[in-house]
Image (cartoon, grey):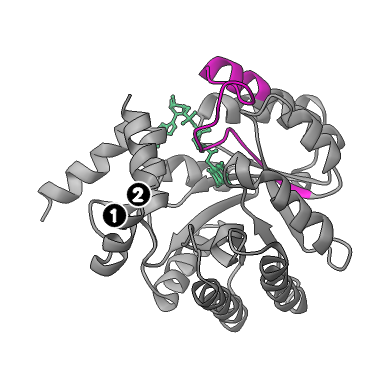
Amino acid sequence: MLKDIFMGLSQNQLLNSAAKKYGLKMGAQSVVAGTNIPEVIKSIKELNAQGISCTVDNLGEFVFKEEEATAAKEQILQVIEAIHENQVDAHISLKPTQVGLDIDYTFCLNNVREIVDKASQYQMFINIDMEDFKHLELTFNLLDDLSLEYDNVGTVIQAYFHNALEYVERYKNYRIRLVKGAYKESDEIAYQDKKDIDANYIKLIEWHLLNGKFTSIATHDHRIINHVKEFVKRNDISKDKYEFQMLYGFRKELQLKLASEGYNFCTYVPFGNDWYGYFMRRLAERPQNLNLVAKQVFNK
Ligand code: FAD
C-alpha cells in the first residue's frame, strides 16, 4: 500500500519540478550527496579514504525536451572531468531517459556515446542504469550499439523479471550490476512476491559469478550478501571478479565492514537537484526509510 503511494508520487512531474526549485528537503540530504560537483567530489574523497570506490549518478529522469537532455549530458561530461582532475576512485551511472531516451533513440545514443567516449579517454567505466520495462529493450540496444565501439560500458539486470536469467546469459561478457528491481511492473512479466524475487536474484548472482565477466552485487540485504560470501568461498571465486554495491547513506556500517574485510565495495552516489523521483523510490522500497524523513523534520 505505502509502496504504491510512493511509487505513484515518484512519477508525479509537478512535485518533481517543485522539488528541483526548493533544493534538498524531506530528509533527501541523508541519501543524496549534495547538489553540485564540489560537494559530490568531497563525498567521494571521504568514501575513498575508507577504501570505498564510487559510482556517481547526476540525478535526473523523465526528460522530454532536447535542451534538458543536452544539459544533462554536459553536466555528466563535467562530472567525468572532475573525477579525472581530482584523481578520485569513481565512475558514472546514468539513466537513459535523462539523456533523451524518451525523445529519440538516435539522439540518446549520440549523447551516451559522447559520454562513453570521454570516459574511455580516462579508462573510466559507464554504467547505464536500468529503468522500467518500457525502456528495457531500448536500453539493451544502447549497450549493443555502444559495445561495437567501446568496452567501458555495462548495464543493470533486474531479478524481478521472469526472464532475467535470459538477459544475464545474453550479457555475460559485460560488467553487469545485478539488482532486485525498483519499479512497479505487472505480474505478467515480473515476480511480485519478495520470496520469488530473492530466489531469482540468488540464481542470477550465482550464474553470473560462475560465468560472467564482472558482477556488481547491488543490495542492502545482509542475507543475500552472506550467501554470496559463502558462495564465492566455496567456488574459489577471486575478489577481482565481483564487488558489492549499496546506495549512499544506507547501511553505512555494513558498507564499511565489507570494505574493511577486503571485499571490493562501491557506493552509488547520487547528487543534484533532480532528487525527487530517486528519493520517492527509496521510500517505496523500504517505508522504514521514512525514519530518515522524520529525523530531518525533527532535527531542525
Ligand atoms: P530489500 O529487498 O529492500 O530488503 C531486504 C532486507 O534487507 C530487508 O528486509 C532488511 O532486512 C535489509 N535492509 C534493506 N535495506 C535496509 C536498510 N536501509 N537498513 C537496514 N536493513 C536493510 N534498481 C533498478 O531497477 N535499476 C537500477 O539501475 C538500480 N540500481 C541500483 C544500484 C545500487 C547500488 C543499489 C543498491 C540498488 C539499485 N537498484 C536499482 C534498486 C534495487 O533494484 C532495489 O530496489 C533496492 O536495492 C532494494 O532492494 P535490496 O536488495 O537492497 O533489499
Residue under the point 67% across and 44% down: 136
Q: Are marks 2 and 1 in contact (CB under 8 Å)?
A: yes
One can see residue 95 in this view: no
One can see residue 22 in this view: yes
Residue 4: give x, y in percent of width and height: 37, 30
Q: Of the residues shown, which amino acid type is indicated by label 2?
A: Asn
Q: Which residue is mark 2?
A: 12
Q: Nearer the viewer, residue 97 or 35?
A: 97
Q: Is residue 270 magenta?
A: no
Residue under the point 33% across and 43% down: 9
Secondary element type, mark 2: loop
Crowding at mark 2 (Cα within 10 Å: few <14, some 14-19, many 20+): few
Where residue 114 sits, quadrant-wise, is bottom right
Quarter of the image for the C terminus: give it. Answer: bottom left
Residue 171: give x, y in percent of width and height: 82, 43
Say if disc 2 is inside 8 Å of ligand 1. Answer: no
Quarter of the image for the N terminus: give it. Answer: top left
Rendered position, 8 above or below 21: above
User: In the drawing, does residue 153 fall left or right of residue 83?
Assistant: right
